[in-house]
Image (cartoon, rainbow, N blue to C red):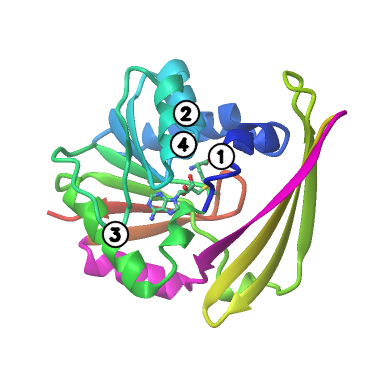
Amino acid sequence: MYDRSAAYYDLIYRDLKDYRDEAAKIDALLQRLSPIPHRLLDAGCGTGEHARRLCRDHGYAVDGLDIEPEFASIAQTKNPSGSFRVGDMRDFDLKRSYDAILCLFSSIGYTETLQGLANAFTCFARHLPPGGWLVCEPWITPDAWRDGQVDSVTALDPKSGETITRTRMGETDGLVSVLKIDYDIEDDASFRQFSEIHRLGLFTREQMRSALEAAGFQVTWLPMGLQSDSLIVAQKMG
Ligand SMILES: C[S@@+](CC[C@H](N)C(=O)[O-])C[C@H]1O[C@@H](n2cnc3c(N)ncnc32)[C@H](O)[C@@H]1O
């Protein structure tokens, strides 16, 4: 999915996402929970930027899981004190538990189907003790999705001198949003292109709530998010 673009991820989001601010918001939220979590798993951790800030700036112990090996490797290099593994959030067993699991920046959408969503929440529940927490930043709901939207971002890599342009176009395939993502990589001497297709399930709030409840969570939707305006905070029941 991200196999060809992983190396450009941080560059692309450098000016689009403020991970330091987001980590501060996550910390403020975690500090309001009881018991206050300390050992965290970031599921769909990407390049480990939230983990890095949560560990360095706020003192959490953070591990990560990502389906893309290149991401797990980048995240591990940035976060030597944690363990960053390659794995599928719909089917994993890390043989340990955490105080809280984070699943941020729409990673949960990649579970794609209601069965995938249910499997991920069941796996999360298995890695939490009773009273443990899940903080999940959802993907777009079906009513908010608009077909045909296009966005484009260009970033300059100061090290290589390359310019990276990423253009995304969204459409739907049934209840799945399909992002066609084109990358143009250019420097003085060369130009190359590649494309990726990302498929993210469009889940309603009710579908997410009932999948969470079926996995044993009590669910609260906060009217605040990191980049969007909603965040799921769910506690595993005893
Ligand atoms: C939009 S990125 C978010 C990455 C990171 N959380 C962030 O905030 O930058 C979505 C991430 O989910 C990962 N992902 C997608 N499907 C997954 C799966 N089934 N299991 C684990 N990770 C997955 C992708 O590889 C990618 O790193």
The secondary element bearing badge 2 is classed as: helix
The residue labelled by disc 4 is 70
Relative image position of residue 4 (x, y in whole percent): 58, 44
Identify the mark nearer the N-term, 1 or 4: 1
Q: Nearer the viewer, residue 46 or 214?
A: 46
Identify the residue shown where x is 67% and y is 32%: 11
Instruction: Please check the rendered image and state whether residue 114 is part of the magenta-colored stretch, yes or no.
Output: no
Looking at the picture, which amino acid does disc 3 mark?
A: Phe
- Give how far apart the Cα atoms at labels 1 and 4 are: 6 Å
In this orientation, which residue lies closer to the viewer: 92 or 137?
Answer: 92
How far apart are the alpha carbons under marks 3 and 2? Answer: 25 Å
Q: Are marks 2 and 1 in contact (CB under 8 Å)?
A: yes
- Judged left or right of residue 93, residue 169 is right
**Do tag 4 and tag 2 residues touch (Cβ < 8 Å)?**
yes
Residue flagged by tag 1: what amino acid is it?
Answer: Ala
- Earlier in the chain: of badge 3 and badge 2, it is 2
- Label 4 – label 2 distance at C-alpha: 6 Å
Question: Which residue is depicted at the point 15% across and 48% down?
Answer: 130
Q: Return the residue at label 3.
A: 121
Residue at the (23%, 55%) spot, across then down: 123
Q: CA distance from mark 3 to mark 4?
A: 24 Å
Specify the farthest residue to the right: 188
Mark 3 against mark 2, which lies toward the viewer?
A: 2
Where are the magenta residues, as a range?
188-216
Q: Earlier in the sequence, mark 3 or mark 4?
A: 4
Q: Are marks 1 and 4 in contact (CB under 8 Å)?
A: yes
Please identify the quadrant where the C terminus is shown: bottom left
Q: Which residue is mark 2?
A: 74
| Residue with the mark numbered 1 | 6
For label 1, being within 8 Å of ligand 1 is answered: yes
- Vertical side of 128 occupied by 218: above or below: below
